[in-house]
Amino acid sequence: MAAAIEESSREIIQAVIEKQKQFFKEGKTKPLDVRKQTLEKLADVVKNHEKEILHALKQDLNKSEMETYATEIGILLEEIRFTLKHIDEWAAPVKVKTAKTHVGSKAYKVPEPYGAALIIAPWNYPLQLAISPIIGAIASGNTAVIKPSELTPHTSNLIADIVHSHFDPEYIKVVEGGVDTTRHLLEQPFDYIFFTGSVPVGKVIMEAAAKQLIPVTLELGGKSPCIVDKTANIALAAKRIAFGKVTNAGQTCVAPDYLFVYKEVKEEFIEEFQKAVHDFYGKNPLTNDTFGKIVNERHFNRLTGYLQDGEILTGGRVDHASLKIEPTLMVPNDDSVPVMQDEIFGPIFPVMEFEVLDEVIEFINDRPKPLALYLFTSDDDVADKVNSSVSYGGGCVNDTLMHLATPYLPFGGVGESGIGNYHGESSFSTFSHYKSILKQTTKFDFSFRYPNSKFGLKIL
Ligand code: NAD
């Protein structure tokens, strides 16, 4: 059991929140110039600490430099660039129409920051998922406390070091720790909570937030299905699916979790998937230094346990010393085995064949709404059918993962896979309350709105 946090740490946390709330109250985070300068500084800090970031992610997850740049650093820099480009437009009051009954008045939606935001991050993209939400929080004029994951300690320490040496703690502060620290943070009077993590912990967060009626965004996980139709370009589909499954060794919230492949193209798919893996990492991915490792022994043991849940088609080798698992295709014994019940979150990919698309749709719709869905087809009718009959957070036709790497698309789940969304303008709106303001005319007044008055118009 994790040790309860020390009384002194509790006091420090309380003092941090009080100071952030005071800083916000004094209006220090609101000027647009301050927000822009802070975001520019954040981009510089990320760029200037690139080497340390690459090193920390190599230690925590054996991420290659290319992968860290593409999935952590690059995404953050692009998000900041995009936000700076659009912030004036997003922060401006939006004039809206008024109803006929409101003739003479003007109406506006005015974004305002919530106040002090708490951001709780997971370990799988430990830099990106801790920093990306603060881009929205800062752009909208909030202060932020970041709680990185304790499972990736090198990145967590680095985030704390670089944030504390470049930003005022009354504005942005990192609080490191595990479950007890998070619990204590959840007792504080934050104005917004942005959580990224698992479904069970998401429920804990929402329950804690409900006690103080704090609004939340929950970016959660679950099992994201992948479908390969008979009309798909099989070689390309296999390559793009393999990319989605091997990136960060499958430890990606939107990684394809399991596959339905059309019966006649199954063998070709398996061959092409294996070829793609070999093209990426050679014949033995376990010895390739650019292939990611599983975050810790507990998750390694959980994942290797899934290898007993069916027949291995390709891969299946594991290396306990380096915590690596070969990208593996397997046929599950049935859909009740753990690999078909749990979110896999690793490079193991159950494959099932189908002949009737309606049965695949029914299978998916009988389960919690997925965070992502990937469909490979060249038939627009098939794409329309799947997309109009399955509810899911977001996804791709003929690709994997890429929908989350564009700031033009909101990113988030639905049902059990999450509440709310972010990226680009959605990050700004997530951390903003839109105040509705009606500005009434004083040039005339309708008498009929008042009790016991006759219809009439009075010019003032
Ligand atoms: P997690 O839910 O175990 O932990 C997330 C955060 O919550 C960590 O900072 C952790 O310290 C804290 N935490 C853990 N248990 C807690 C408790 N009982 N009370 C309070 N706080 C607690 O998730 P994880 O293992 O770090 O990440 C993996 C999960 O996150 C997967 O389910 C994955 O799909 C999901 N995820 C979702 C997204 C997304 O954007 N939707 C992105 C990445 C990961």
Image (cartoon, helix red, strand yellow):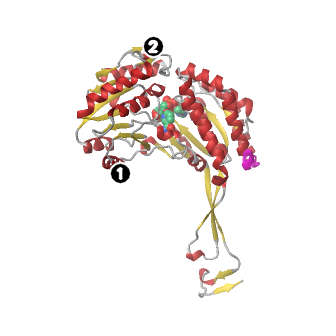
- Residue 99 percent across, percent down from the top left: 56, 73
Q: Is residue 287 above or below residue 80?
A: above
Question: Can residue 7 be seen from the camera position used here?
Answer: no
Question: Of the residues shown, which amino acid type is indicated by label 1?
Answer: Ser
Residue 326 percent across, percent down from the top left: 40, 19
Secondary-structure class at tag 2: helix
Give whichever of 19, 458 is nearer the camera: 458
Q: Where 414 sits versus 1, above or below? A: below
Q: Give x and y (percent) for residue 267.
A: 26, 28
Q: Is disc 2 in contact with disc 1, using a CB cutoff of under 8 Å?
A: no
Figure check: 138 above or below 321: below
The residue that disc 2 covers is 287
**2 or 1: tag closer to the N-terminus:** 2
The residue to which callout 1 is attached is: 388
Dot 2: few (<14), some (14–19), or many (≥20) neighbours within 10 Å? some
Q: Where, by quadrant of the figure, is residue 137 drawn?
A: top right
Q: Is residue 145 above or below residue 162?
A: below
Asked whether residue 322 is drawn in magenta, I would say no
Number of the front mark, 2 or 1:
2
Q: CA distance from mark 2 to mark 1?
A: 43 Å
Residue 122 appears in view = yes
Q: Nearer the viewer, residue 290 or 113?
A: 290
- Magenta residues? 24-34
**In front: 191, or 318?**
318
Instruction: Residue at 39%, 37% (x, y): give it.
Output: 224
Q: Position of residue 445 (x, y in %)?
A: 66, 81
